[in-house]
Amino acid sequence: EKINNGKNPGNGDVQEYDPWQAPELVDNSPAWAELNGQEKLQRVGYIVLRFVVIICCLYLFICSLSLLSDAFRLLGGKAAGEALDEEGIVSNPIAGLMLGVLVTVLVQSSSTSTSIVVTMVGADIIAVQHAVPIIMGANIGTSVTNTIVSFAQSPNRDEFRRAFGGATVHDMFNWLSVIVLLPIEIITNYLYRLSHALTGNIKGDSSANQDLLKALTSPFTKLIIQLDNKVIEKIALGQKEYLNKSLIKAHCGATVQVVPMNLSVMVNVTNESTGITSLESVYNIVNVTKLLDKPCHFLFANTGMSDPVVGIILLLTSITLLCICLIMLVKCLQALMKGQVAKIIKKTINSDFPGRWSVLTGYVFMLVGAGVTIIVQSSSVFTSTLTPLVGIGVITLDRMYPLTLGSNIGTTTTGILAALASKSGLHNAMQIAICHLFFNISGILLWYPIPFMRKCPLNMAKFMGNTTAKYRWFAIAYLIFAFFVIPGTILGLSLAGWYVLLAVGGPILIILIAVAIINVLQQRRPKSLPAKLRSWDWAPIWLRSLEPYDKVLTRCCFCSRKKSNEPEPETNC
């Protein structure tokens, strides 16, 4: 890609640049030595204020992710729990995979969906073999959050390119891992056999803490909404009476109340004159302790609104808060990431270890990603926080990749803690949690150590980012199709039977594989192809380009594209 840099194109001053490289943010402010005392104090005050704003925005950003998750639970949590209870779905590995994607997207938390699956396996509702594809699907569904987060940087073309690529590198890794490992698991059951061998004499701990991040976010989020997540779990466990129960808490604990009451007691009373003993009723005032339900006091408590209505309000509110926090976060980081400070931070994060130790750099950052995710107990929060940093160029896509892989490892601790807290079926619950761990480890061994294999997810993410930078609407189309339409369609076809799935999906899969092979040969060995297949110029333009769709969509949103050789304006759709 070329950019003119504002110079006269007629003079040939066209400089090539890589939009994926972290941009140099130039500090045009006066040097420290040139400032007087008041100006120095003012600059220090601005820096401190920016740090305070960054911390506050980061906190509200994490809270908005929690509210977004609650909104999706209210909108689709019951349907997700009911779907997990359908034996005909979970027994089909393809249907189970797509169900895992859809359930995780609906509840906006792989931790929640994984914990529900672990609990169901522990209760012998789902067999371990049937739960493995669902866990794989949960891995894919969890990356929808940081894809949504990347939309906040859509006004700036190059920032959006990098942010969307940083978000989708997680998707590409998860999809590639599933495409390779799910058929292997169906044929060999290697994850089941390995986890069965490793889960032996394991003792449970019902006090295992499953959500450390809640201690930070709950003081704010509990003022707005409180959900009873046990409702989804009970529905998934087959208790249909919970379908009519609201997810919004009506009672928050209980209060102890001491009430004086008149109680009659039958006692033996002896008449002193006659000496006859008889039973008589004697009334005494005694204190009786009662447990009374404590009403909840949060914004949406006892409003009378249904779960879907509250879910829609919460969804719009959380997305608005998320965008505001991200915009402010990016602006403050851009103001701080200038000059020498930016160079030091970028060099520290993006540089490799010296000499022969450079090969270990990515693995160290994997450990960092795993450690932070274990602490916050949420891969979505961790990767969503990194996404805007990739957009503004603080973190490169190459560095984001190992951090994301480490986050995949760290998020498996939620399932392990849920298994340890299981009251029954501990062996099976721990086995599926270990399956989740070794699925991610297998994916890393497949797509990271070998350099050319490592480039596959990275190149795919760069392709997604480049396409999105050219056609902004592609990001929304990708989100809808990758996480809703395609999983839902495949789920429906697989439920209709293997023959229907093969009849419809088989030809499409063969065509996609053939196109991918031809594309590789066109770039690497074009002479090995027939003359007609060395390019796609012979194909209709609507099959080989997004331009026709772009024209229709831009016309619909009243945007016009300039037909010139200059870079497209930032206001394009």
Image: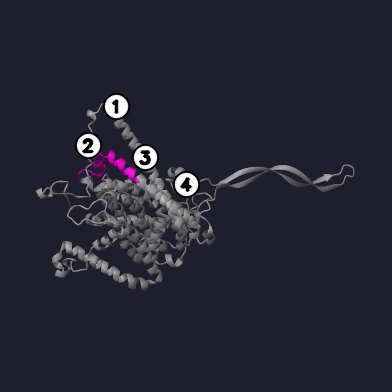
The mark found on residue 224 in the picture is 4
Q: Is residue 375 visible?
A: no
> At 34% from the left edge and 43% from the top edge, which residue is drawn?
328
Q: Is residue 88 magenta?
A: no
Residue position marked by numbered label 3 in the rendering: 55
Query: Which label sits in the foreground, 3 or 4?
Result: 4
The residue to which callout 2 is attached is: 28
Nearer to us of marks 4 and 1 is 1
Q: Residue furthest left?
A: 11
Comes first in the chain, label 1 or label 2: 2
Residue closer to the observer: 485 or 415: 485
> Which quadrant of the view contains residue 468?
bottom left
| Percent coordinates x, y for residue 152 in the rendering | 32, 49
Q: Residues within 10 Å of mark 4 (few under 14, many from 20)?
A: some
Give the spatial CA distance, label 3 vs label 1: 26 Å
Residue 31 x/y as whole percent: 22, 31
In the image, residue 96 above or below residue 413: below
